[in-house]
Image (tube, rainbow, N blue to C red):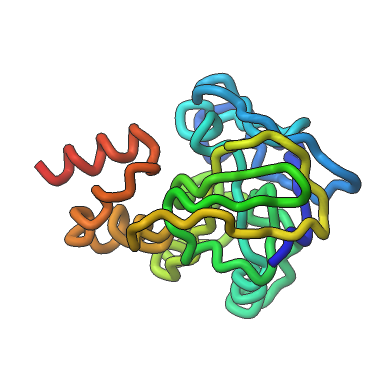
Amino acid sequence: MRVISVNVGRPQPNPWKGIGATGIDKRPVEGRVAVTAPGPKGTGAVGLAGDRVYDVAHHGGTDQAVYAYPREDLDHWEAELGRPLADGSFGENLTTTGLDVNGALIGERWRIGPDLVLEVSCPRIPCGTFQGWLGEQGWIKRFTEAVRPGAYLRVVTPGSVGAGDPVEVVHRPDHDVTVALVFRATTLETDLLPRLLVADALPEEDMARIRRRLT
């Protein structure tokens, strides 16, 4: 289990939303990148030095500090779409291999390299910017039905990350709520929502939304 690419965004125009720019254009960088806790959502700050988001109402902040996506799923989509997808194509900060990102438990912790510790917080939910960036008609529906969302992570112990760093799972909470289960429950299978209540590491705003939907 390791990181094969560390990707940082380059600002691009965002004609798909009512905001001026997007940071979805993530590209591999060389060397080590510092990773710190960015603080609350709303500032555009994220975990990796040199990166940021522009849709500050929906992205960034403590619970979406880092986005990880597995190379194995990018390979799946390459075959499905019939075109190459470079590391970072889905806007992920960390492209991984050998790691079951979608099967990770909410609250699971990963040690990456010598000092960085990240905690799995929630799945990525596709949006209009993602669809427009890929240029695929009906992409939101297709991505949702595939249940391969990738995971957002929060920073527990700041450090640095570089391509080739090993990933070690150092903590797994005592429940069965995975990234994929949260994604299914909040998109396609709302009857699964009650199962999410035991995952206390879910972002507070997500948990509040789940409780409202259940009542």
Q: The C terminus appears in which quarter of the rendering?
A: top left
- Residue at image point 50% right, 23% down: 40
**Residue 125: in sight, yes or no?**
no
Side of 174 where 40 appears, left or right: right
Q: Is residue 179 visible?
A: yes
Which residue is rendered at x = 55% and y = 39% of the image? 154
Which of 103 and 112 lies nearest the eye of the viewer? 112
Q: Residue furthest right?
A: 31
Residue 146 lies, with reference to residue 139, above or below; the image says: below
78 displayed left or right of 122: right
Where does the image place residue 142, in percent across and percent down from the top left?
45, 67
Looking at the picture, how far across and down is residue 3, in whole percent? 74, 59
In terms of depth relative to the viewer, which is nearer, 108 or 80? 108
**How far across and down, in percent of the image, does residue 75 sit?**
66, 74
> On the rendered image, what quadrant is the N terminus found in?
bottom right
Residue at 61%, 42% in the rendered image: 66
**Is the residue 177 above or below the residue 115 in the image?**
below
Location of residue 8 with respect to 204 vertically, above or below: below
* Percent x, y of residue 28: 81, 51
The one nearer the camera, 78 or 44, is 44
User: In the visual, does 178 lie left or right of 41?
Assistant: left
Picture layout, residue 208 above or below residue 171: above
